[in-house]
């Protein structure tokens, strides 16, 4: 009987939750299964994977074929790497102690990566929350300033300035004709000053008339 390691869907619409099971390859996806190996919850970041490592490794060694998604899950949890190391021990490439040491180092590095990812996600979430709070506070301040500006009457200085702007043109218009009059009178005075006196009769003509 050909066996498969596959996901069996559970959960509500939009939030699926999966069981990792061993089934007959001819059985439907959500039908009967031989053994349940663990669970997979993709609704969190990072996803939560709970799996029975020894049972899963035993089924893989027996020839159970995982689906593509299950293969990625088993690789993520180190099941396939463990199988690879056991194959190396059988071939004499290294001892069982060396295989265990390599697997322990791999687990340590994997845990470090996972913790780093969690810290990065938490920091990004905190930064997003702070940015959202700052934007909300800024909007509240702008609204409050708009309300205050709407309810505050115009200042007295602004009213006086507007009155001065209105009165200044009137005064200039009233003074303008006086200046024009002064400008028109000035040439008259100049003409009178420059007008020559009456021409005097020449002395020779007076003498001739007396004779």
Image (cartoon, helix red, strand yellow):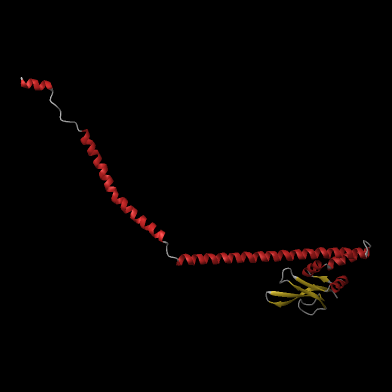
* Image coordinates for residue 100, horizontal then vertical, percent: 89, 65
Give 210 or 19, whichever is nearer the viewer.
210
Residue at image location 65% in from the left, 65% down from the top = 128
Identified at 69% across, 74% down, the residue is 15
Q: Is residue 4 above or below residue 208?
A: below
User: Is residue 205 shown to the viewer in this render?
Assistant: yes
Q: In which quarter of the image is residue 129?
A: bottom right
Choose between 190 and 60: the one closer to the eye. Answer: 190
Q: Is residue 75 rendered to the left or right of residue 140?
A: right
> Residue at the location (78% across, 63% down)?
113
Answer with left or right where residue 64 lies relative to residue 149. right
Q: Is residue 122 left or right of 176 when viewed as pictured?
A: right
Query: Vertically, is 36 above or below 200?
Result: below
Tell me the quarter of the image containing the C terminus: top left
| Residue at x 31%, y 53% (from the top left corner) | 170
For the question of whether residue 21 can be seen, the reply is: no
- Name the image quarter holding the N terminus: bottom right
Q: Farthest bottom residue?
A: 32
How many numbered callouts?
A: 0
Percent x, y of residue 142? 53, 64
Q: Nearer the viewer, residue 101 or 151?
A: 151
Q: In which quarter of the image is residue 35?
A: bottom right
Seen as rendered, the residue at the extreme front is: 156
Task: Please identify the quarter of the rendering in which residue 166 is found.
Answer: bottom left
In the rendered image, residue 25, in percent from the top left (x then y), is placed at: 81, 74
């Amino acid at each position: 009987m050909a066996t498969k390691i596959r996901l069996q869907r559970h959960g509500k619409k939009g939030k699926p939750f999966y069981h990792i099971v061993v089934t007959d390859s001819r059985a439907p996806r959500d039908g009967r299964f031989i053994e349940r190996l663990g669970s997979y919850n993709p609704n969190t970041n990072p996803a939560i994977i709970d799996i029975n490592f020894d049972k899963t490794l035993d089924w893989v060694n027996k020839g159970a074929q995982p689906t593509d998604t299950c293969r990625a899950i088993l690789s993520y949890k180190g099941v396939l790497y463990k199988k690879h190391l056991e194959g190396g021990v059988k071939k004499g490439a290294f001892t069982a102690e060396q295989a265990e040491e390599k697997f322990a180092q791999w687990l340590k590095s994997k845990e470090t990566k996972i913790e780093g990812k969690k810290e990065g996600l938490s920091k990004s979430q905190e930064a997003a929350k702070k940015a959202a709070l700052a934007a909300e506070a800024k909007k509240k301040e702008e609204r409050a300033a708009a309300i205050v500006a709407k309810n505050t009457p115009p200042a007295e200085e602004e009213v006086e300035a507007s009155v001065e702007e209105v009165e200044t043109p009137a005064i200039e218009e009233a003074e303008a004709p006086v200046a024009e009059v002064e400008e028109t009178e000035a040439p008259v005075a100049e003409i009178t000053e420059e007008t020559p006196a009456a021409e005097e009769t020449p002395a020779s003509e007076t003498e001739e008339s007396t004779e």
